[in-house]
Amino acid sequence: MNMTSIGRGFGMGDYVISAPRFYGEVEEPNDDIYWRFETINGAWLKEGVVSLGLGIGYESYAGSKLGESPASNGSFGQLPLFLDVRLHPGNAPVTVFAMVQAGYSFGINPFELPAVVVTSELVIPAQSVELNGVQLAPGLGLLFRLSDDVAFHLSCLYDYHRFNYELIGISSVGGYIPETYAVQYGAVRIASGFVF
C-alpha cells in the first residue's frame, strides 16, 4: 500500500540550542511554521489492523529563527527518511488509528549563518549550516474508507526534532576550534492524504 500526505507544522515552546564550548545553552522562541510532504510505501502486517511502512518526505522551512541571517532569510529544507507504524483497532468505514514515525532527517539546502564575535578571543566566521538528526512523531488520526482500495486519512502528530551541526571558531591565538551544536524543538503537525 501507499500513503501520501501533505502536512503543516506549527512550532511549540522554544528551540533549545546547545554549544558547550562557545556559549553553553540558549533558548529561542519557536514560532516556525513549515510544510511537510511525504509518501510511505508499506504493507499490512495484519490486514486492516497493523501497517508498517518506509517513508520519505520533504520539510520546507521559511523565515526560521534557526537560519535567520541576511544571506539565508531563515529558509532551509529537510529530507526525512523514516519508519511508519500504524495501529487500526477496527475495520469500520471510519476508524481512529494510532501511529508513530521514527527516523533520520538530512539537511538538503543549508542556511547561511553570519559571523559572530563570541569573545575578544573567539570569532565564529560566516558558515553554511546543514541540520542532520533524529525525528520522532507519535500521533492519532482518523481513517475514512472510500472503497475497498482507497481511504482518506487525517492525523495530528507531535514532531520532536534533535538536529546536530558543526561550526568552526577561530581563536585569536591561532587555530580553528570545532564545535558541534545540538538543536532540539517540537511542533504539532496536522496532515491529510490518501491510502491506496
Image (cartoon, grey):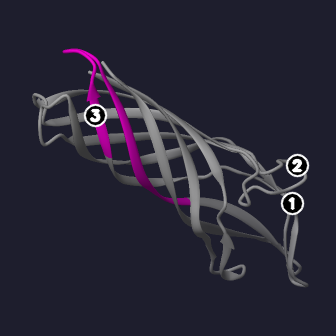
Residue 115: x and y in percent read: 88, 64
Q: Give the residue type that dot 1 points to.
A: Pro
Front residue (pair 94, 187): 94
Q: Which mark is residue 114?
A: 1
- Quadrant in which the C terminus appears: top left
Residue sitting at x 41%, y 48%: 156
Upstream in sequence: badge 2 or badge 1? 2
Tell me which amino acid carries mark 3.
Answer: Leu
Compared to residue 120, the image places residue 116 above or below, namely: above
Residue topped by disc 2: 71
Residues at marks 2 and 3, CA–CA distance in whole angstroms:
43 Å
Residues marked 2 and 1 touching at CB (< 8 Å): yes
Residue found at the very far left of the displayed protein: 46
Left or right: 35 in relation to 154: right
Residue plotted at (74% across, 60% down): 65
Q: Secondary structure at mark 1?
A: loop
Q: CA distance from mark 2 to mark 1?
A: 8 Å
Q: Which residue is mark 3?
A: 143
Q: Position of residue 184 (x, y in %)?
A: 54, 66
Q: Secondary structure at mark 2?
A: loop
Q: Quadrant of the N terminus?
A: top left
Asked whether, in this view, residue 37 is left or right of residue 25, the answer is left
Instruction: Examine the image and state in which quarter residue 113 appears.
Output: bottom right
Q: Which residues are magenta?
A: 141-163
Q: Residues within 10 Å of mark 3 (few under 14, many from 20)?
A: many
The 10 Å Cα crowd at callout 2, few under 14, some 14 to 19, many 20 or more, is some
Residue drawn 39% across and 53% down?
137
Q: Main secondary structure of the magenta part?
A: strand
Q: What is the residue that sits farthest to the front in this orientation?
A: 93
Q: Would residue 157 be counted in the magenta stretch?
A: yes
